[in-house]
Image: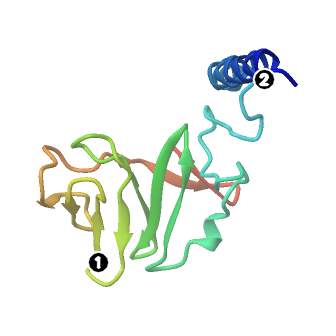
Amino acid sequence: MTRRNFFEKLVATIYGGTTLAFLAPALAYLFPNRNFAANSNVLTDADGQPIAAKAIEEGAFVTGMIAGRPTIVFRRQSALVAFSTVCSHLGCTVSYNRGEQIFQCPCHGGEYDADGRVIGGPPPAPLTPLNVKEAEGSVTLS
Protein backbone atom coordinates (compact mmCIF):
# COMPACT_ATOMS: atom_id res chain seq x y z
CA MET A 1 0.00 0.00 0.00
CA THR A 2 1.38 3.35 -0.96
CA ARG A 3 1.41 6.36 1.29
CA ARG A 4 -1.15 8.04 -0.95
CA ASN A 5 -3.56 5.07 -0.69
CA PHE A 6 -3.11 4.98 3.07
CA PHE A 7 -4.04 8.66 3.46
CA GLU A 8 -6.97 8.33 1.05
CA LYS A 9 -8.38 5.49 3.15
CA LEU A 10 -7.68 7.38 6.37
CA VAL A 11 -9.49 10.49 5.15
CA ALA A 12 -12.39 8.40 3.83
CA THR A 13 -12.68 6.67 7.21
CA ILE A 14 -12.67 9.99 9.08
CA TYR A 15 -15.32 11.45 6.76
CA GLY A 16 -17.40 8.29 7.07
CA GLY A 17 -17.20 8.37 10.87
CA THR A 18 -18.15 12.04 10.93
CA THR A 19 -21.09 11.37 8.63
CA LEU A 20 -22.31 8.55 10.88
CA ALA A 21 -21.92 10.75 13.97
CA PHE A 22 -24.25 13.32 12.43
CA LEU A 23 -26.57 10.82 10.80
CA ALA A 24 -27.26 8.63 13.87
CA PRO A 25 -29.19 11.27 15.88
CA ALA A 26 -31.16 12.25 12.77
CA LEU A 27 -32.18 8.64 12.21
CA ALA A 28 -33.05 8.22 15.90
CA TYR A 29 -35.31 11.25 15.58
CA LEU A 30 -36.97 9.98 12.43
CA PHE A 31 -37.42 6.43 13.77
CA PRO A 32 -38.15 6.72 17.51
CA ASN A 33 -38.25 3.86 19.97
CA ARG A 34 -41.66 2.24 19.47
CA ASN A 35 -41.71 0.88 23.03
CA PHE A 36 -41.52 4.40 24.48
CA ALA A 37 -45.01 5.72 25.02
CA ALA A 38 -44.37 9.47 25.33
CA ASN A 39 -48.04 10.32 25.08
CA SER A 40 -49.23 7.62 27.44
CA ASN A 41 -50.87 8.70 30.68
CA VAL A 42 -49.92 5.38 32.28
CA LEU A 43 -46.88 5.00 34.54
CA THR A 44 -44.34 2.86 32.66
CA ASP A 45 -40.87 1.51 33.40
CA ALA A 46 -37.77 2.11 31.29
CA ASP A 47 -38.88 -0.55 28.79
CA GLY A 48 -42.27 1.08 28.29
CA GLN A 49 -44.13 -1.61 30.25
CA PRO A 50 -46.92 -0.42 32.59
CA ILE A 51 -46.19 -0.55 36.31
CA ALA A 52 -49.03 -2.08 38.32
CA ALA A 53 -50.49 0.08 41.07
CA LYS A 54 -50.36 -2.85 43.49
CA ALA A 55 -46.57 -3.00 42.99
CA ILE A 56 -46.24 0.35 44.78
CA GLU A 57 -46.35 -0.47 48.46
CA GLU A 58 -46.59 1.95 51.38
CA GLY A 59 -43.24 3.71 51.73
CA ALA A 60 -41.86 2.36 48.44
CA PHE A 61 -40.71 4.84 45.80
CA VAL A 62 -41.10 3.81 42.15
CA THR A 63 -39.62 5.75 39.25
CA GLY A 64 -40.98 5.65 35.75
CA MET A 65 -42.43 7.77 32.97
CA ILE A 66 -45.86 9.37 32.64
CA ALA A 67 -46.66 11.34 29.47
CA GLY A 68 -42.97 11.51 28.60
CA ARG A 69 -41.97 12.94 31.99
CA PRO A 70 -39.66 11.20 34.42
CA THR A 71 -41.83 10.59 37.47
CA ILE A 72 -41.54 9.22 40.97
CA VAL A 73 -44.62 7.69 42.59
CA PHE A 74 -45.08 6.52 46.17
CA ARG A 75 -47.83 5.74 48.64
CA ARG A 76 -48.58 7.95 51.60
CA GLN A 77 -51.39 6.77 53.89
CA SER A 78 -52.56 4.42 51.10
CA ALA A 79 -52.94 7.31 48.59
CA LEU A 80 -50.70 7.59 45.54
CA VAL A 81 -48.45 10.66 45.41
CA ALA A 82 -46.42 11.59 42.33
CA PHE A 83 -43.89 14.24 41.37
CA SER A 84 -42.04 15.04 38.21
CA THR A 85 -38.40 14.27 38.95
CA VAL A 86 -37.17 17.21 36.89
CA CYS A 87 -35.32 19.67 39.13
CA SER A 88 -36.68 23.21 38.90
CA HIS A 89 -33.15 24.64 38.86
CA LEU A 90 -31.64 23.39 35.60
CA GLY A 91 -33.71 20.34 34.68
CA CYS A 92 -31.56 17.54 36.10
CA THR A 93 -33.29 14.38 37.33
CA VAL A 94 -33.67 14.13 41.10
CA SER A 95 -33.64 10.87 43.02
CA TYR A 96 -34.90 9.82 46.42
CA ASN A 97 -32.36 9.43 49.23
CA ARG A 98 -33.84 6.84 51.59
CA GLY A 99 -31.34 7.54 54.37
CA GLU A 100 -32.17 11.23 54.61
CA GLN A 101 -35.74 10.83 53.30
CA ILE A 102 -35.37 13.65 50.79
CA PHE A 103 -35.20 14.10 47.03
CA GLN A 104 -31.74 15.19 45.89
CA CYS A 105 -30.50 16.72 42.65
CA PRO A 106 -27.04 15.38 41.76
CA CYS A 107 -26.11 18.39 39.60
CA HIS A 108 -26.07 21.31 42.01
CA GLY A 109 -27.14 19.90 45.35
CA GLY A 110 -30.82 20.85 45.32
CA GLU A 111 -32.88 19.16 48.02
CA TYR A 112 -36.63 18.67 48.32
CA ASP A 113 -38.71 17.18 51.13
CA ALA A 114 -41.28 14.40 50.64
CA ASP A 115 -43.87 17.03 49.72
CA GLY A 116 -41.66 18.35 46.90
CA ARG A 117 -40.83 21.62 48.70
CA VAL A 118 -37.31 23.07 48.39
CA ILE A 119 -35.32 22.57 51.60
CA GLY A 120 -31.83 23.35 50.30
CA GLY A 121 -29.71 24.33 47.34
CA PRO A 122 -30.43 26.57 44.36
CA PRO A 123 -33.83 25.32 43.04
CA PRO A 124 -36.21 28.29 42.71
CA ALA A 125 -39.43 26.26 42.88
CA PRO A 126 -40.75 22.97 44.30
CA LEU A 127 -41.03 19.75 42.32
CA THR A 128 -44.05 19.65 40.04
CA PRO A 129 -46.79 17.53 41.63
CA LEU A 130 -48.70 15.22 39.31
CA ASN A 131 -52.29 14.13 39.89
CA VAL A 132 -52.36 10.37 39.59
CA LYS A 133 -54.95 7.73 40.30
CA GLU A 134 -55.36 3.98 40.14
CA ALA A 135 -57.31 2.90 37.08
CA GLU A 136 -57.66 -0.65 35.82
CA GLY A 137 -54.75 -1.78 37.96
CA SER A 138 -52.36 0.85 36.60
CA VAL A 139 -51.20 4.26 37.76
CA THR A 140 -52.56 6.91 35.43
CA LEU A 141 -52.31 10.67 35.13
CA SER A 142 -55.65 12.25 35.93
Nearest to viewer (mark 1 / mark 2): 2
Q: Quadrant of the N terminus?
A: top right
15 in relation to 142, above or below: above
- Tell me the amino acid under the disc marked 2: Phe
**Which circle marks residue 57 in the picture?**
none
Q: Residue at x 68, y 17 (%)?
A: 15
Give the image location of residue 54, x and y in percent: 64, 71
Tag 1 secondary structure: loop
Task: State the residue in front, 7 or 17.
Answer: 7
22 in relation to 45, above or below: above
Q: Residue at x 30, y 65 (%)?
A: 103
- Tell me the amino acid under the disc marked 1: Gln
Q: Are marks 1 and 2 in contact (CB under 8 Å)?
A: no
Q: Earlier in the sequence, mark 1 or mark 2?
A: 2
The residue labelled by disc 1 is: 101
Task: State the residue in front, 70 or 57.
Answer: 70
**Which circle marks residue 6 in the picture?**
2
